[in-house]
Every structure is written in structure tokens, then in C-alpha cells.
Amino acid sequence: MEILNNCINNTQVKVINTNKFKTVNIEIFFTKELDYKDIAPYNLLVNILISRNAKYPSISSFATYKEDNYGLSVNGGYTSRGNIGVVNFRVSAINSKFALSEDLLHTQIDTIKECLYNPILDKKTLNEVKDIYVSRLKDKLNKKTYILKKKVNELMGNDSPYGVDIESNIEDISKVTLKDLKRVYDKLLTSKCYVYVIGEVDANKVYKELSFLSVKGNDDKLDYSYLKTIESSNNEYESKFLQSAISLIYECNIVYTDKLFYALKVFIEMLNYDLFNIIREKHNYCYYIYALCNNYLNTIEIVSEIESKNFKDIIRIIDEIIKDYENDKSSDFEITKNKIINLIKANQDNSRDIALVHFGFDFIGAVSSMEELMAKYEEVSYEDVKEVSKMLTLKVASILKEANHE
């Protein structure tokens, strides 16, 4: 695998040249500091960009075009990393050498050009995409974990990185105007931009084909200054569902520059193993339970679906699990650490994962290669994991209770 870096019109372009894949995957990431009033327009903009362009102005015509080009795919999304909003735009295509002499790389990059620089931004398109997006949000209202997530986000503050509703909501989506849409499109083209090309390609041809790029990138960097102490709270919400959903948010202030950051990742993997085997298998309290670490907010959230009568008992058991890390669990630790290192190696077998990992390297700057990343995990000791376990504090315990059908 050969990695080549270049800068084209103020845009970082990284070609990861490998013959592992029959496809060429091009991933583009735009980063900009979160402006909360722009979240709804950005979500609609991304859905417009990936579904049509000036050459193919409808969903159906664009779908036919993609199918005619060996099933070329165009996807994207809007997410957040701490206080930074990220627009991801990706186009994947069969490598030209498998396409009967057709230059699919040119077609692929031309598709990017048309979608990004010749979008259809009019009222008709906006209203169509609004209807589709609102319909998706309505479908999610039948999921209890989704509803609880929204309630917890609101509690934490939708205008802060802790509670940001990054996919927006029905009310805000409905209010988006064409002026809003054009405003965030202009912002998109003044965002910092990263491009990753993964596949067996001629790098010089890639650079030439991407010469149309015209992004006036700023120098957005992750800023930890927004980190704050989370207010403690216990929250109960009524629902119509037959089973409860829970969310437990723990504060754990370990930032990227902290020597315990990689130990935190090992701890989370160990914790998930214990949550499954003790709460699910031993006590049979739930079908699933898992912990997620937010890399940018220094929080850990545990989610599950349980009976509300077991809520306090589960909190007690989780507390016991965490305290048990003060004892010797070094054998579990070694297994978990090796599992993480093997997963890092396995990520190199998926072009999508490769793009995400390298974007993470460039976005944060903590490490710059797979080898350096694996070395960081190799350095983690069980004493480090112990230290992490002592830093957790349960701050927000929330439950969406099952309906009472008595």
C-alpha cells in the first residue's frame, strides 16, 4: 500500500494506492465549526448533492446514470466531531481495468464535479427532499431508543456539542428555506476539505482529474475549550412501548493529548465484554447492552432496553463491574488489547474504513499512520486501564419507561 500526499487548490488530496480492491473509492470530508442554526439546512443539502445534479436533475435520472456506469454509487452524510460539523461525500466505482476499457475513473470524478459544483438548488427540489427527509424522521418515532436519545440530547442542550441533534428534527427541517440552503452551500465551499482516493490508480491522473477543485479552506481544528462539567440528573419519561430504554452517561475527561486516551479505548472494549456477560448472560436483564465512548466529548454512554423495575439494580451492577477493574484482570486485558490491534489491521481490508481512519489521522493529528496507531495500543498497560476505571462518574441516568397496561 503506497500513500501519496498532494495539495490541489488548497485541498489536501491523499492517494492510497492499493490493488486490494476491485473498486476505487473517493471520499471527501468538509469540516467547519458547528453553527447550530445550519444543521437542518446541511442535512437537506447533503441529500440533494447525493441524489441529483444539473446533468441529471431528478432522482430517477441520476439513478439510471449510476446503474449504466456499472452501478457507480454516490453517498454522503452530515455528522459532528466535538464542536466541528463534518460533511462526508463519497463516490465508489469499479476500477477502470475491469470495465471493458471504459474510463470509469474519469466518470467517477466527473460525477463528483457535477454533484458538488452544479447542484440543483431550487424550491421544487428543496420541497421534494424535505418530504423524503421528514418521512424518514417520522419512521424513527416508532423506536424507543431514538426517542430517548432525542430527550437526552434536549436535556444536555441541543446548542452544545454534548446534546447536539445532528440529524435535526421535523420542525427545523420543515422551516428550511431556499435562502438557508444556499447559505450553507456557500459555507461548504469555504470549509476545510480532505480528499482520499483508495484503489489501484495512476496518482498523476487523479491529480489532473481533480484540478477542478476550488475550495477556500479555513484552518478548522478541534478545540477542547468547550469541555465542561456535566450537570447530574436522574430522568424518567413515560412512553407507549412495552419495554423501557435506558441511557447512562458517565463523565471521563480524557482528551487526545492525555496519556490514558488509548487505555480508555481498551477499557471500553473490556467493559462491553463484561456488560454482555454479566448483565445479559448472567442476570438475563436485557437482550443487548453496550457502552460507547465519544472520542470528542470525553463521555461514555451505556444504552440498553430493560424492564424499568430493574433500572436501579443495573446501575448498581455496572458500578460493581467498573470497581472490579481495581482487581487483577490482566489476562482479559491482554486478549482485549490484541483484539483491538487485530481490528486495526482488519480495517485495512475495507476501503471505507481506510478512508475514515486516515481522515481521523489528519483531523486530529495525534498519530499519522496505522503503525503508529498500533504502537500506541502496544504501550498501554493494565495499570493504565485501572486508572481509567477510577475516572468514571455517572452523571446522567435516563429511562424511557414502558407503558402501564394494567
Image (cartoon, rainbow, N blue to C red):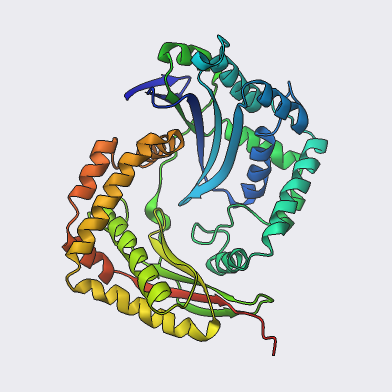
Picture quadrant of residue 17 = top left
User: Hey, which residue is sitting farthest right in the picture?
Assistant: 124
* Number of marks present in the image shown: 0
Task: Please determine whether, in this image, residue 60 is positioned above or below residue 307.
Answer: above
Q: Is residue 276 visible?
A: yes
Task: Please determine whether, in this image, residue 56 is positioned above or below residue 277.
Answer: above
Picture quadrant of residue 89 = top right
Quadrant containing the C terminus is bottom right
Say left or right for 10 vs 47. left
Rendering coords of residue 91 (x, y %)? 56, 29
Rendering coords of residue 302 (x, y %)? 44, 68
Task: Please determine whether, in this image, residue 10 is positioned above or below residue 81.
Answer: above
Out of 391 and 104, give the one closest to the viewer: 104
Out of 283 and 39, give the one closest to the viewer: 283
Quadrant containing the N terminus is top left
Kindly identify the residue that appears in the image at 49 percent across and 78 percent down: 233
Picture quadrant of residue 329 = bottom left
Say left or right for 189 vs 389. right
Kindly identify the residue that appears in the image at 54 percent across and 81 percent down: 307
Rendering coords of residue 381 (x, y %)? 17, 58
Say left or right for 333 vs 1. left
Kindly identify the residue that appears in the image at 59 percent across and 57 percent down: 165
Rendering coords of residue 35 (x, y %)? 57, 48
Q: Is residue 358 visible?
A: no
Out of 291 and 187, give the one closest to the viewer: 291
Kindly identify the residue that appears in the image at 50 percent across and 31 percent down: 27
Say left or right for 84 vs 273. right
User: Hey, which residue is sitting farthest bottom in the picture?
Assistant: 406
